[in-house]
Image (tube, rainbow, N blue to C red):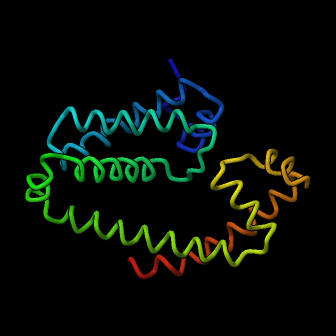
Amino acid sequence: MSTYHSYDDLTLLSLLKSSDDAAFTEIYNRYAETLYHYAYNILRDEDECTDAIQEVFVWLWNSREKLQITELKYYLLAAVKHKLARAIRNSKRKAEILAAHPLIQTSFEEDSLELKELKAVIVQFTNNLPPRAKEIFHLSRNEYLTNREIAAKMNISEKTVENQMTITLKKLKQTLGSFWVFFL
């Protein structure tokens, strides 16, 4: 019997980054049904829900080496919500879905506004970083390079990259902490 069911999400994510098929299977088994029910409550279409969930898990597998996730369940729910928003926008049943769930349209519109504001805050934050920290942050978060790859590309030590990212992420967390107060 597999012991993967006893692993916490962070352990599974770590194993997933190493291309561990059993860890991926456990994540799927742990969350697919919950995600499906969430999607079905909104779309009421088995095929569309199954497609949305499968796309999220395919993306999770394909992006496994670059993942920066701390709360897997909420991350997957957010990914499904994003897929549903896109599916609703492109659906011939858009009016029907939104009529059945009037709060969804408001929620998706608010999310879109929040996302735009969040992106603006992050852009402003990165623009205010010192040049080297700005480049390291960009290479890490936009080009998805590892610390080792960044160090080689910039001809600096890997430890310098780690230190810069730690400092930058602490500052970003502080910046976003005050930003998110407005959405509580």
Residue furthest top in the image: 1
Residue 114 occupies which quadrant of the picture? Answer: bottom left
Counting from the top left corner in percent of width and height, residue 53 is at 34, 37
Q: Which residue is drawn at 35% across and 66% down?
A: 111
User: On screen, 171 above or below 163?
Assistant: below
Counting from the top left corner in percent of width and height, residue 101 is at 13, 59
Q: Which residue is drawn at 61% across and 71% down?
A: 173
In-image side of 129 versus 177 (left or right): right
In-image side of 93 versus 60 (left or right): left
Counting from the top left corner in percent of width and height, residue 162 is at 80, 57
Residue 183 occupies which quadrant of the picture? Answer: bottom left
Counting from the top left corner in percent of width and height, residue 106 is at 23, 68
Residue 130 occupies which quadrant of the picture? Answer: bottom right
Q: Which residue is drawn at 24% across and 53% down?
A: 89
Q: Residue at x 53, y 24 (%)?
A: 22
Q: Count the numbered circles shown.
A: 0
Image quadrant where one finds the C terminus: bottom left
User: On screen, 87 above or below 51?
Assistant: below
In-image side of 35 versus 11 (left or right): left
Depth order, front residue of 56/31: 56
Depth order, front residue of 26/56: 56
User: On screen, 42 above or below 46?
Assistant: below
